[in-house]
Amino acid sequence: MDLEARAHSEHPDELRLWLRLLTCTQLIEKQVRNSLREQFSTTLPRFDLMSQLERAPEGLKMNELSRRMMVTGGNVTGITDQLVTEGLVERVDVANDRRAWRVRLTPRGRKLFNDMAQKHEAWIVDAFAGLNAKEISQLHKLLGKVKQTTPTTEIA
């Protein structure tokens, strides 16, 4: 039973909408996870880490990666260790800080990430194939309004 099935007609429409958003997110994420595993033998957290590094060609410190990914430093370290072993990322010293490293994609890692990113984009486009361009635009605008009116707090 998915989250949406738990809501009943007597629940507020806002709750039913929230559960539908969660259900859709989970369904799309499950498809992306499966496709990454089947086509690239990788995981969504590894893809996410490489995505952050792709946006920062000079590399990122481990604490920056952790903050951007909203996960613990231990999670980032474990994923980074695997990717270093596979030659997809490298650690480089940070000038004036002997305790810190920057992590960046290797050329091989950048090529693999670009291949994965192209497929990832296609999977997401496919996930919204049931909507036309006008509906996608309208949904994007409506969710933007929700985002603007929702209080934010920093995630630790």
Image (spheres, rainbow, N blue to C red):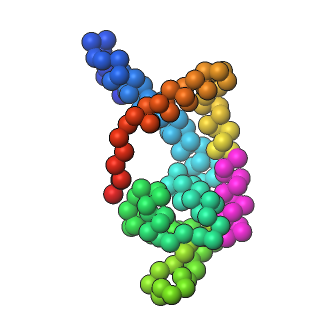
Q: Position of residue 39 (x, y in %)?
A: 65, 48
Find out whether residue 115 is within the magenta segment.
yes
Q: Position of residue 141 (x, y in %)?
A: 55, 28
Q: Closer to the camera, 53 or 5?
A: 53
In the displayed structure, 128 sits above or below 95; it is above
Q: Closer to the camera, 79 or 10?
A: 10
In the displayed structure, 67 sits above or below 106; it is above
Q: Position of residue 25 (x, y in %)?
A: 47, 35
Residue shown at 72% from the left, 69% from the top: 107
Q: Is residue 57 visible?
A: yes
Q: Quadrant of the N terminus?
A: top left
Q: Is residue 2 visible?
A: no
Q: Quadrant of residue 20?
A: top left
Q: Closer to the camera, 135 or 130?
A: 135
Report the side of 18 relative to 94 (left or right).
Answer: left
Residue shown at 40% from the left, 58% from the top: 71
The residue range painted magenta reads 106-118
Q: Closer to the camera, 38 or 124?
A: 124
Q: Quadrant of the C terminus?
A: bottom left
